[in-house]
Amino acid sequence: MKAIVVDQESAGQPLSWEEVEDPVCGAEEVLVDVYATAVNRADLLQRAGQYPPPAGAPEYLGLEMAGIVVEVGERVGKWQPGERVCALLAGGGYAEQVAVPQQQLMPVPEGWDFVRAGATPEVFLTAFVNLFMEGGLAKGETVLIHGGASGVGTAAIQLAREAGCRVLVTASHQDKLERCRQLGAEWGVNYKEQDFAAAVLEYCDGVDVVLDIAAADYLERNLEVLKLRGRLVCIALLTGNRAEIDLGLVLRKRLRVIGSVLRSRSLEEKAEIVHQFRRRFWPLLESGHIEPVIDTVLPISAAAQGHEILMKNANIGKVVLKIRD
């Protein structure tokens, strides 16, 4: 098969689409012909040598995919060759084939194409686990979503909206804020023009949950905007991984600071996340009440261009890479 290979020895870590060894389907795995995958910031980190795949995962980039089952392992009971599936991956999405643990697969909803399905698993499962399973977001609460126009942000807005929550967002441009409002955010602030914490506290009395991608530079202000018993869920470190924390504020407001990753979780944890998401929100995907927001669709040969879009923070929603038509 072919896959995107990173040249770690050259400046800029260029990408090439070249022949590699075929994946082997394990006894409890499903082999899938990949039709579409999508770009995530973790791919950029892995390309730069800063985020290696977990032990046992494919070495190639790509944390999600959509395609057609071509082979099933001897202990796979549910899935059959020919079925259209999508899945969260620990790696290997930027390839013609990938072997996936059967517990991580989800069916492609009726009427969906592979582009739409390939843009769904990583952002919706990331948003779901961090808002609800980690952050404990409940009906009637208020959530602040940083990077509201990102792939995870656009998914998180929709899930929180459907859960009966008030949604506030930050974004870098007015057009991004407007798209967030269309998706269900009631208010937003351009973090390049205003201090987001001051703006939030001028708008309301604070939030119950913060979904944060910035980390270090935002830590103090994230704690400021949290209400009593608020929860800060950190899912990325875009501004660094070290900052001072006012533990007095944490104690007085009985706050919780939660760190969360998805890629390196155990198969059992991922299976439970998939199960809980499908039980609660899958019907809303099938009905179109929630859906992936797609910014750009490119051929896999243009993967580097897709990375550039994310590096420049130029996207609203997902950048999808097509591997097969």
Image (cartoon, grey):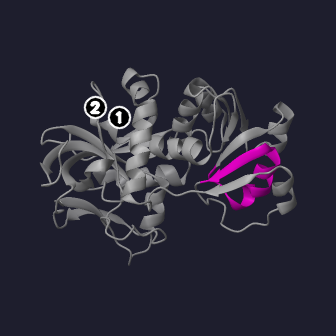
Classify residue 203 by image quadrant: top right
Alpha-carbon distance for marks 2 and 1?
6 Å
Residue drawn 51% across the image and 46% down it: 129
Q: How many marks on residues? A: 2
Return the residue at label 1: 116
Residue 304 at what x, y percent from top left?
39, 56
Q: In the image, is residue 222 part of the stretch drawn in magenta? A: yes
The C terminus - image quarter = top left
Q: Which residues are magenta?
A: 212-234
Circles 2 and 1 in contact, beta carbons < 8 Å:
yes
Mark 1: few, some, or many residues within 10 Å (few <14, many ≥20)? many
Q: In the image, is residue 86 part of the stretch drawn in magenta? A: no
In the structure shown, which secondary structural element does the residue marked by tag 2 occupy? loop
Residue 208 at what x, y percent from top left?
73, 40
For residue 123, side relative to residue 1 (left or right): right
Residue drawn 46% across the image and 33% down it: 293
**Whether residue 299 is visible:** no
Residue 118 at what x, y percent from top left?
34, 41
In the structure shown, which secondary structural element does the residue marked by tag 1 occupy? helix
- Mark 1 residue type: Arg
Q: Is residue 32 above or below residue 207?
A: below
Mark 2: few, some, or many residues within 10 Å (few <14, many ≥20)? some
Instruction: Identify the disc placed on residue 163.
Output: none
Residue drawn 25% across the image and 47% down it: 323
- Mark 2 residue type: Asp
Q: Is residue 77 above or below residue 240?
A: above
**Whether residue 237 is visible:** yes
Residue drawn 64% across the image and 51% down it: 233
Instruction: Identify the disc placed on residue 113.
Output: 2
Q: Nearer the viewer, residue 16 or 135?
A: 135
